[in-house]
Structure formats: C-alpha cells, structure tokens
Amino acid sequence: MNARTTTKGAWTALHIAGSYNHTGTMKELLGRGAEIEAQADRSWTPLHVAAWCGRADAVALLLDHGADTEAKTDTGRTPADWAEHKGHEDAVLEIGKAVSLRHAERVKALRILKARKKRG
C-alpha cells in the first residue's frame, strides 16, 4: 500500500493513523502525498475520524496541513460537530483555534487589498 491507496468507502492509511493518534506515521503519509481530504464511507475525512476519536494531536496535525474544518459527512456533520458530540473538548478547541486563525488571515488579506485599492 502506498500513501494514496484507498478503496471507495474504505479508510485510507491516514484515516487509520489519525484514529490512533500516530502523528509520526501521519507526517510520513502526508509527506508521501496522502490525500488529506480522502473520503471514506459516509464521506468521513481523516479529520472527522481524528475528531470523533478525540485525537487532539492528530486533529492539530491535519489542520496544520490544511484539512477542511467545514467538510461534512453524509449526515451534514463537521469534524467539530462530531468532536463535540463525543465530548472531546481538546479536539473541539484545536478546530476552533484553526478556524479563528484562518478567519484572522482572511481579515488581514482583505485589509491589505482595501489599502491597495485606496492607493490606487
């Protein structure tokens, strides 16, 4: 199996590593091109799995690599929804930090664009 191997509906190696909080393995897989948004059965991404399992370190690593916090399962739930549902406070906090940081980056970019527009 390579980093990109998957079968429709099956978990990838990244899903599995995230479920066990094996961040070293996850880094290796991501470095070899693992698909961070791979969808397993019911549209679960590796971030959904890590959040559901309460693996805050795995959640943080996936977010650092750009995992989509708004990805939805077939029931419309985000990774934060599942972490909250399972009572995994640390995973919820990691997702919240990433969302806040991404929002702040967008606001900063908009301010730069507005300043450039004013100058002309």
Image (cartoon, rainbow, N blue to C red):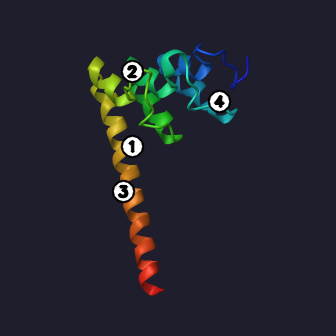
**First in sequence: mark 2 vs mark 3:** 2
In percent of width and height, residue 94 lies at: 36, 36
Instruction: Report whether 114 appears left or right of 25.
Output: left
Q: Residue 104 bears which disc, if any?
A: 3
Tags 2 and 3 in contact by the CB under 8 Å rule?
no
**First in sequence: mark 1 vs mark 4:** 4
Instruction: Report whether 109 appears left or right of 80.
Output: right
**Circle 4 is placed at which residue position?**
34
**Circle 1 is placed at which residue position?**
98
Q: CA distance from mark 1 to mark 4?
A: 21 Å
Please identify, in this view, whether the residue under mark 2 or under mark 4 is nearer the observer.
Answer: 2
Q: CA distance from mark 4 to mark 3?
A: 28 Å
In percent of width and height, residue 91 lies at: 35, 29
As shown in the figure, which amino acid type bears the numbered disc 1? Ala
In percent of width and height, residue 35 lies at: 62, 31
Quarter of the figure with residue 86: top left
Q: Nearer the viewer, residue 117 or 95?
A: 117
Please identify, in this view, whether the residue under mark 2 or under mark 1 is nearer the observer.
Answer: 2
Tags 2 and 1 in contact by the CB under 8 Å rule?
no
- Crowd rating for badge 3 (residues with CA inside 10 Å; few <14, some 14–19, many 20+): few
In percent of width and height, residue 109 lies at: 44, 65
**First in sequence: mark 1 vs mark 3:** 1
User: Under tag 4, what secondary structure?
Assistant: loop
As shown in the figure, which amino acid type bears the numbered disc 2? Thr
